[in-house]
Amino acid sequence: MQMQRYRFTWQLTVVLFMSWLLAGCGINNIPQYDEQVKSAWAQVENQYQRRADLIPNLVETVKGYARQEQDTLTAVTEARAKATSIQISADDLDDPQKMQQFQQAQSQLTGALSRLMAVSERYPDLKSNQNFLALQSQLEGTENRIAVARRDFIAAVQRYNTEIRTFPGRIWHTLMYGDMPIRESFEATTENAEQAPQVQFQ
């Protein structure tokens, strides 16, 4: 009985020591970094949704002062509809085609918003409207948040990809996490897309 208790204690000690040793060797890094990538992507989507939520109010405000700019207003509305129709789940992060479609739709919406802002310059009453000024501030803040969220996502993807391509992460990836592929990063689809667009309301 005493011998069995001693053997059990010894086995438990060995198991705990091996667990500690493996944890220290980075065996958990890959799933942790993978979760960070997914979390960072959720923030990217959250900020794009925040922008999309501002657009209907912005369009309605501009429409009140510039009804004759119907083509521009329609372009913004259509670009918003297309951008919000493309959803990227955590499983889609490994699909370059879906990621590219998402990025292109968001880029088109950014372009349509820029044209809407240019139109607003021709209407002094619109530019001084308090609702428009509040939307301006929110939109500028959101564009900055989008830029930060995208930067954080790119950093998370880089950390994850580096881990599974270098020692000892490459070993753990081969032995235990072979079904977790290289992640696609958020590539700029327009010039200077890594920077927040300069939305001017002057």
Image (cartoon, grey):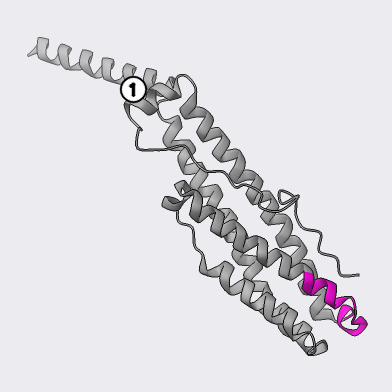
Q: Secondary structure at mark 1?
A: helix
x, y percent for residue 84: 55, 69
In the picture, residue 43 is in which quadrant? bottom right
* Relative vertical location of residue 13 with respect to residue 174 in this rendering, above or below: above
Quarter of the rendering containing residue 113: bottom right
Q: Using the image as rendered, state which of residue 81 and residue 22 is in the foreground.
A: 81
Which residue sits at x=58%, y=67%?
83
Q: Position of residue 162 (x, y in %)?
A: 53, 29
| Residue 120 located within the stretch drawn in magenta | yes
Q: Is residue 127 above or below residue 154?
A: below
For this rendering, which residue is in front, 103 or 38?
A: 103
Q: Which residue is mark 1?
A: 19
Q: Residue furthest top?
A: 3
Image quadrant holding the C terminus, namely bottom right
Residue 77 painted magenta: no
Between 134 and 182, which is closer to the camera in this rendering?
182
Residue at 42%, 36% (x, y): give it: 31
Image quadrant in which you'd find residue 138: bottom right
29 horizontally vs 10: left or right:
right
Q: Main secondary structure of the magenta part?
A: helix
Q: Which residues are magenta?
A: 115-128
Q: Residue 154 location, x and y as percent? A: 61, 42
**Image location of residue 3, percent across then percent down:** 10, 9
Residue 42 higher or lower than 80, as above or below: above
Amino acid type shown at disc 1: Ser
Q: Residue at x 43, y 24 (%)?
A: 170
Neighbour tally class for label 1: few under 14, some 14-19, many 20 plus, Cα within 10 Å: few
Quarter the N terminus occupies: top left
Residue 48 vs residue 39: left or right?
right
Question: In the image as oriented, which residue stretches furthest toward the left?
Answer: 1
